[in-house]
Amino acid sequence: MQSVESKILYNDRLAEGYFRLGLSWKTPEVKAGHFVMLRLSDGMDPLLRRPFGVFRVIGAKGKSTRGTGIELLYRVVGRGTTILSAKRPGESLGILGPLGNGFPAPQKGRKVVMVTGGMGIVPLYLLAQRLPEGTLLFGARSKKETFLLDEFRELGIKIKTATEDGSAGVKGFVTALLEKELSTDTVVYACGPVGMLKAVSRLCLDAGVQCFVSLERSMACGIGVCLGCAVRTINHEARENRNYKMVCSDGPVFDGKDVDWELL
Ligand SMILES: Cc1cc2nc3c(=O)[nH]c(=O)nc-3n(C[C@H](O)[C@H](O)[C@H](O)COP(=O)(O)OP(=O)(O)OC[C@H]3O[C@@H](n4cnc5c(N)ncnc54)[C@H](O)[C@@H]3O)c2cc1C
Ligand code: FES
């Protein structure tokens, strides 16, 4: 983990309320599923850093013309992300990271299926880059949100979409697509809204399929100190079979069968 004083390389508007942020960082040792905590101001507003998944590493192998570092995608939802959206290239931002455990590699010969909805797509890009033979199942409310898929198409990964209003792909939830993909040699990686993760996890458990979920909780420290991001997990071997884990330092990626979904 490093604490880096970074410069904003770009902060481009992707669509209404969605931004792509490039941050300078000379040596980001980032793997799929890692996240960073961003300090959005030098003052008290906002006081706490905010967590964001790493979308991709930029400037690797000299490909980027915009600098070396990391790229994040974010949606404006509150005070911190509104402040972030007003920042301009050249301004400084403090990065703490990379944080978290990241997604484990699949066992050899497994069929990889990634399942996501909304901004849950962010940590899956690095995974898709490493596993382009996998399939990405993307769920959204409508076609308007499918612009997030543009970069994935360039990786050559197979993409299937479900929208709630039927304006792109099949009509309905992404879990309907997942049901058709499950076989005993499948491994599932999922990130997105908690309701979706719970449903994905349940489907996988019932089908005997291994499933890794990346959870999101509000985070104050990001490094396992404040205990604010605790989730209850199920320890299948222990006699006292409930315990708590920190999403920031034990996760954010967990085996879906170990999460106590009733409390999320
Ligand atoms: C590991 C991790 C990775 C993340 N990656 C991304 C990403 O790649 N792109 C992105 O846009 N967002 C991501 N988020 C969510 C992002 O951290 C929040 O949207 C951001 O902190 C909101 O800050 P704010 O000050 O704008 O909103 P606030 O004013 O703090 O909150 C606005 C609203 O958003 C809700 N909220 C805030 N944080 C979270 C959270 N962590 N989970 C669910 N609801 C929340 C609040 O309850 C409130 O309703 C991630 C969160 C985590 C924990
Ligand atoms: S955010 Fe502080 S312990 Fe996880």
Image (tube, rainbow, N blue to C red):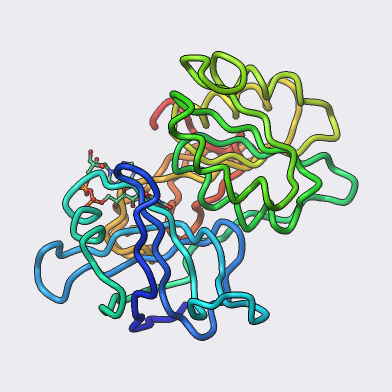
Q: Is residue 7 left or right of residue 34?
A: left
Q: Is residue 161 visible?
A: yes
For residue 229, above or below residue 44:
above
What residue occupies the far left of the structure in this picture? 44
Residue 127 in picture, x, y percent from top left: 66, 54
Q: Image point 38% across, 82% down: which residue?
A: 4
Residue 28 horizontal/vertical position (percent): 53, 77
Q: Give left or right: position of 233 versus 108.
A: left
Viewer-closest of 174 and 97: 174
Specify the quadrant that holds the C terminus. Answer: top left
Picture coordinates of residue 226, whole percent (x, y) = 28, 60
Residue extending farthest to the right is 109
Residue for point 20% across, 53% down: 82
192 horizontally vs 212: left or right: left
Q: Nearer the viewer, residue 219 or 174?
A: 174
| Residue farthest along the front direction in this orientation | 65
Residue in the picture at 48% in, 17% down: 164
Q: Picture quarter containing residue 210? A: top right
Residue 41 drawn at (x, y percent): 18, 71
Does residue 241 show up?
A: no
- Asked if residue 130 lies left or right of residue 185, the reply is left
